Amino acid sequence: MSQGDHSDLLARLSVWQGDITTLATDAIVNAANSSLLGGGGVDGAIHRAAGPQLRAFCATLGGCPAGEARLSPGFGLAARHVIHTVGPVWRGGAHGEATTLAACYRACFDIAHAQGLTTLAFPAISCGIFGFPFDAAATIAVRESMSALAARADLKVTLVAYDAAASQLYEQTIARFA
Ligand code: AR6
């Protein structure tokens, strides 16, 4: 890949700090659990902001295994769609957690591609209740985003950091890929 191509990818990858439920992207990604029926963390925030229609829709999906993703409308959200993915629970790192987390990002990008969704925002999947170490997860998030951006010239990706420390770590991780 030439230098010019690489800087184009970086121009389409951004870090934004705040509440993902406020973003008016084509889709926001939800860090769900395998029931898809809601929970705490970002999942709870997305369901509250979307309203009860989201849970009713998700109840028709029949759940989702870790490493896969499912699409729903955004209902009351500013985003048009939600891509629900189920990250791995961190169990020390020797149980395929990194592979499963990478599969989550790829599954979300595959759905976005199939549906023609071009602006996507991701929370730090698995980095809260599921306990995945943030620095390792950030490397996976940036690596998978860069390869999706390389595959699609119309794609734009926002990595959403909930606090300043996460934002700084994402920026540092992106700088390592630059
Ligand atoms: N906007 C952006 N990021 C957020 C928000 C928000 N509104 N709220 C939290 N985060 P978590 P997980 C960050 O725990 O680890 C649920 O109960 C948070 O700081 O939401 O994948 C599900 O139902 C962290 O960096 O998701 C599952 O059972 C990141 O989002 C389980 O939690 C992910 O934290 C999934 O756990």
Image (spheres, rainbow, N blue to C red):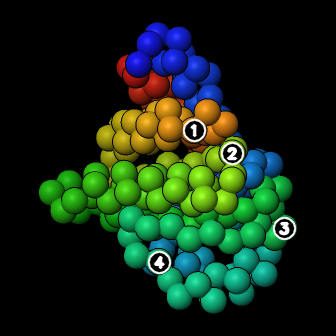
Position of the C terminus, as image quadrant, is top left
- Label 1: state its secondary structure: loop
- Label 2: state its secondary structure: loop
Mark in the foreground, 1 or 2: 1
Q: Determine crowd level at label 4: few under 14, some 14-19, many 20+ residues with C-alpha closer than 10 A.
A: some
Q: CA distance from mark 4 to mark 3?
A: 22 Å
Mark before the other along the chain sequence, 4 or 3: 4
Q: Determine crowd level at label 2: few under 14, some 14-19, many 20+ residues with C-alpha closer than 10 A.
A: some
Residue indicated by mark 2: 118
Q: Are marks 4 and 1 in contact (CB under 8 Å)?
A: no
- Label 3: state its secondary structure: loop
Q: Are marks 4 and 2 in contact (CB under 8 Å)?
A: no
Give amino acid for label 1.
Arg
Q: CA distance from mark 4 to mark 1?
A: 26 Å
Mark in the foreground, 4 or 1: 1
Residue indicated by mark 3: 76
- Residue at the spot x=69%, y=52% of the render? 117
Q: Are marks 1 and 2 in contact (CB under 8 Å)?
A: yes
Give amino acid for label 4.
Cys
Residue 13, percent from left and from top: 58, 30
Quadrant of res 158:
top right
Residue indicated by mark 1: 152
- Residue at the spot x=20%, y=54% of the render? 93
In the image, taking residue 95 as reference, residue 140 lies left or right, namely right
Q: Relative to 4, say whether 43 is above or below.
A: below
Mark in the foreground, 4 or 3: 4
Give amino acid for label 3.
Gly
Q: CA distance from mark 1 to mark 2?
A: 9 Å
